[in-house]
Amino acid sequence: MDKGWNPPPYGWGNAQTTQPPPAAPPSYSQAVGGVGPSSPYTPQYPPSSGPSIVTTVVPVGPHPTHMICPSCHAEINSATKTKPGLIAYISGAIIFLLGCVFGCCLIPCCIDSCMDVHHKCPNCGAYLGRYRR
């Protein structure tokens, strides 16, 4: 057996390997200059000097929605009103182009499934949103 060959040192206990462990990589905010990560779902808050109220957007649907009004902060069921939407107008134009010119083209404006639903607060009257078909 060759006496001149020594196995490489292992572990931190050897006097030959006293170098510190490698430093951790910088955090995201350090790497990009102090700006945190952002996504379409990350809320962006404007700078303010005092306490602020954070509201969340509740998706509205075809029926009244139970929510807290962002305007008056009351717990409400939204008041809904239907109005003809883009689908009603496009359907009416297609019916007109197919030759039904004697009022039949207005039928889509009377069908609820072709109507957009507008939501308002019954307490303060604030507009809360629209559900598009």
Image: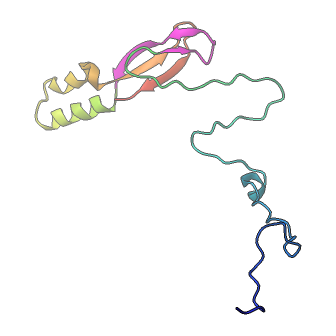
Which residue lies at the image location 48% right of the left edge and 12% below the top edge? 78
Asked whether, in this view, residue 37 is left or right of residue 97, the answer is right
Quadrant for the C terminus in the image:
top left
Q: Residue at x 72, y 54 (%)?
A: 28
Position of 92 compared to 22: left or right?
Answer: left
Relative to 75, does residue 14 appear above or below in the rendering? below
In reply to whether residue 70 is colored magenta, the answer given is yes
Quarter assignment of residue 64: top left
Residue 77 in picture, x, y percent from top left = 48, 10
> Which residue appears at 77% of the width and 91% of the height?
3
Where residue 16 sits in the image (x, y, percent)? 86, 76
Residue at 84% in and 73% down: 17
Q: Is residue 4 above or below residue 50?
A: below
> Going by the image, does 94 lie left or right of 87?
left
Q: Which residues are magenta?
A: 66-84
Name the outermost residue toward the top: 123
Whether residue 109 is situated above or below residue 9 in the rendered picture: above
Q: Position of residue 30 (x, y in %)?
A: 78, 55
**Image quadrant for the N terminus?**
bottom right
Task: Report the residue that reaches farthest toward the front.
Answer: 1
